[in-house]
Amino acid sequence: MGSIAAGYSTNWPSIREHVSPEEWQARLDLAACYRLLDSYGMTDLIYNHVTLRIPGTDHLLINLYGLLYREITATSLAKIDVEGNILWKPETEYGINKSGYVIHGAIHKARPDVAAVIHTHTRAGMAVSAMTCGLLPLFQTTMRFVGHIGYHGYEGPAVDLAERERIVADLGSHDAMIMANHGLLTCGATIQQAFNTMYQLELACRGQVDAMAARTELTMPSEEILQKTAHLYQPGTRRPYGVLEWHAMLRLLEAEQKGSGFPPYWA
């Protein structure tokens, strides 16, 4: 029993001194993103995945399949190529989730502008993914996605490499997508942008579920106002998504870390 448990230990020594400064920073940012998804209730046990491209390379970082988001650290992240081949991971029995590179690898390969991809199975996200109406522009939070979100039909668990082309085609040039009967996906030029987009998309889905559950007539602004609002909330219009918020998010994680019993994300 002891040897089996040892194979699944998460007590790994830091690799900070064994990787480039660029890779270590990417590891810190990605580990923080996993912890933030946990803090904001966007996890599904050990499932789902977030990937981040290591600057200057075609290599990606991804979580080990078996860890909770709240225990992921900079050191625990696996390094893979876009085809899902593991280039490095800690000494452990844990591997990676195949869906992680079927979905994410396809997007990273087709979209050089994308550094990070996030996929979730939240309660609200799944609910909206099953609605024939899709995401409705009911709130300011939702209006940023008007004309800027893709939809991908359900094809079963994402383990078939043949699905990759259709995922990429349905995402198009957007940074957000609803995967029908499945969940949500966002991507971005930075991990900060991808997280902020996912936070807003998740909030929009929660709001839609709540509003529709009220069983009352709903109002929506005019098409002119929807288009104006969507434009104003695009990353290049006023400021990039997520950058201004990021340091506050890191302070939140540092405060939450105290007494949590889990290693800090920067370990």
Image (cartoon, helix red, strand yellow):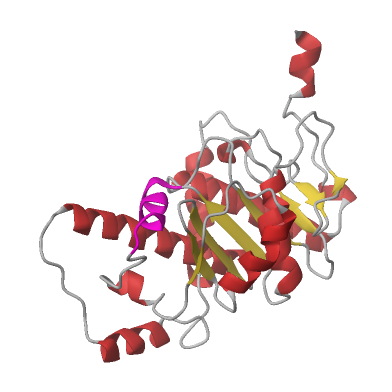
The residue at 27%/55% (across/down) is 209
Q: Residue furthest left?
A: 216
In the figure, is residue 99 to the left or right of 195?
right
* Image: 77 above or below 111: above
In the figure, is residue 176 to the left or right of 216?
right
Taking the magenta stretch, the answer to whether it contains residue 254 is no
* Image: 131 above or below 239: above
The residue at 73%/72% (across/down) is 110
Res. 104 visible in picture: no
Asked which quadrant contains residue 212, the reply is bottom left
Q: Nearer the viewer, residue 162 or 234?
A: 162
* Image: 106 above or below 154: below
Query: Residue 28 location in percent, x, y?
Result: 68, 53
Query: Residue 140 location in percent, x, y?
Result: 29, 74
Res. 241 visible in picture: yes
Taking the magenta stretch, the answer to whether it contains residue 125 is yes
Q: Which residues are magenta?
A: 122-132
Query: Residue 47 location in percent, x, y?
Result: 58, 40
